[in-house]
Amino acid sequence: MDLSLLKQRSPFEWHISPRGKMRVPGVIYATEGLIRDMDEKVYEQVTNVATLPGIVQASYAMPDAHWGYGFPIGGVAAFDPDVGGVVSAGGVGFDISCGVRALRTGLTVTDLQRVKEQLAEALFHRVPAGVGSTGKLHLDRHEMEAMLAGGAQWAVGKGYGTQEDLTFIEELGCMDGAKPDCVSEFAKKRQQDEMGTLGSGNHYLEVQQVVQVFDAEVATIFGLRRGDIVVSIHCGSRGLGHQIGSEFLKRMAVSAARYHIDLPDRELASAPINSEVGQDYLGAMRAAINCALANRQIVTHLVRETFADLLPQATLSLLYDVSHNTCKVEEHVLDGIPARLFVHRKGATRAFGPGHPDVPHSLRAAGQPVLIGGTMGTASYVLVGTEESMSLAFGSACHGAGRSMSRHQALRQWHGRDVVKELAARGILIRSPSFRGVAEEAPGAYKDVSEVVDAANDTNLARKVARLEPLICVKG
Amino acid sequence: MMQNWEHFPHKADMGIRGIGPTREAAFEGAALALTGVITDPTEVIPAQKVSMTCQAPDDELLLVDWLNALVYEMATRKMLFGRFEVHINGHSLQATAWGEPVEVTRHRPAVEVKGATYTELSLKQDEQGRWIAQCVVDV
């Protein structure tokens, strides 16, 4: 990105002054290096989001921002329904509530070594991953409605996990306001055999090792120590979310003119929050959030079963579950006055600071865990929300490394078989149904996750707690 | 014969493009490019046929609808498609796709397509009169 387009406010904060139809400024949080490497499209998309009706404060981009759909991936924007604010299907994206959860295991690296190969195989066979995979569960009409209304709470009620798990999931595992009747029959049909599946692309299931602790006090509150084994699960609302995303994108793109919304990009498809389309979308999108939460809960159950077979001494307890692609109603302070806003996070993580009532009681003194997924060959990070992040970007932080190279280019550069071999030599076992999929997800195709995390840390969007490195990675 | 489809790069996902002498041929090429995101289309045996219809207010939205109809059929039938026949009348489309159930060991599917997007979406004729239908798909 051309730096001359931006005004630098601090080493990590870059502003785009309102011009043309922009209603608010754009703000990008990143180092100079990350900004230079960012696609010009990020600038265009941050600027476009700033033109949407009812946007407040600013259109934000996180340090991992890259070219997305309408919104940049790593985009955050909040809308006030009382001044004509909109909800945008493009602003949430196709994989509604795609997210990451991390589980402590009570194990150390030494416990794992003996069964590492077996565990990799067993996880790969137990957790359905990749194109065409189905779960063991088939949802009939009644169960589908119950799942869409109940989320992870429904899954726990079915025996997938414990009541304690729910404490450590955003919204306590169940998004209020879901309207299963706003979800099309197509979306429901697409989901009926997909519960408890990982999906493909950048989704993964990893067994990781805590290799470094940056903040001992918070790490203790989070129950993390150097040498601990952690399991991370990255997946979303599967076919149901994708279908809802596609259907509402069209419905909003077609209805925008009727609501006098001037879309600079059709992908920004939006509708007023206080409109029939807007309300239908919110009901369907919240049902998709519940689907994602239930899905991660079932995958967790499958992981627990697998560990119980091979490492019966393991106790898999949930550290936290964060969602990346959402629009949520939250209270934030605008010019000193509390306001009820519809906060869109597209490829961005909620990162509430210490003392926030939505952070689980046992973690509240520290703040919300922020789980940042890396690549299968580098690292993931656990961060914690800060007080400052609440005013910087509505309590939001980055969500991952972000790609630096297209899949197209990655395929030309790497062979999946070689990537698997190289990682095995470094002690990282990859299991995937597709070598081509592995090549497209090669670690070198992503930005340096450490630089992204350092930028989030130095900006105070979230503070570093621990670094996790992969030992086993199941890719779809 | 020249291949009637290709991919173009997008940072996070994949661009698909169909090229042909008619709108229909370009739509068919775009469908092959969609399969090409997942597996080699020539590896897909056209054993079963599935019919579909779509309507949209304009041709570009029709292209997205067509691709999303295929995404839906692939997802719910657990199939891949390797041959297509498209008929367009105004902004309505009638099509047949031929394919077979996904066989992971043979097709080695790289990635699942979540949906077709409006990013880089266009349907136009180039200087030689060829129709070009393209968009980015989210994977």
Image: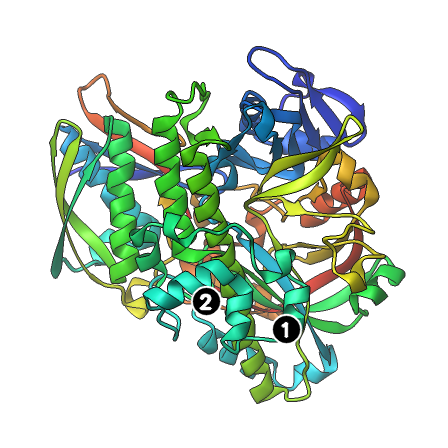
Percent position of residue A391, x then y: 77, 35
Q: Report the front residue among B106 and B124.
A: B124
Instruction: Tell me the quarter of the image containing the C terminus of chain A.
Output: bottom left
Q: How many marks?
A: 2
Mark 2 surroundings within 10 Å by alpha-carbon count, few (fewer than 14), some (14 through 19), many (20 or more): many
* Colour mode of the rendering: rainbow
Give the labeled residue for mark 1. A163
Is residue A250 depicted above or below A290 in this figure?
Answer: above
Q: Which mark is residue A432?
A: 2
Apparent side of residue A76 relative to residue A298 in the rendered image (left or right): right
Residue found at the very far top of the displayed protein: A20
Percent position of residue A209, x then y: 71, 69
Residue at 44% x, 64% y is A146
Report helix, strand or loop for mark 1. helix
Q: Report the front residue among A61 and A284.
A: A284
Mark 1 surroundings within 10 Å by alpha-carbon count, few (fewer than 14), some (14 through 19), many (20 or more): some
> In 3D space, how far apart are the residues under numbered discs 1 and 2 (Cα atoms)?
32 Å
> What chain letter is assigned to the residue under label 2?
A
Residue A83, by quadrant, is: top right
Instruction: Tell me the quarter of the image containing the N terminus of chain A.
Output: top right
Apparent side of residue B22 relative to residue B38 in the rendered image (left or right): left
Residue found at the very far right of the displayed protein: A217
Name which residue type carries label 1: Gln
Q: Is residue A180 visible?
A: yes
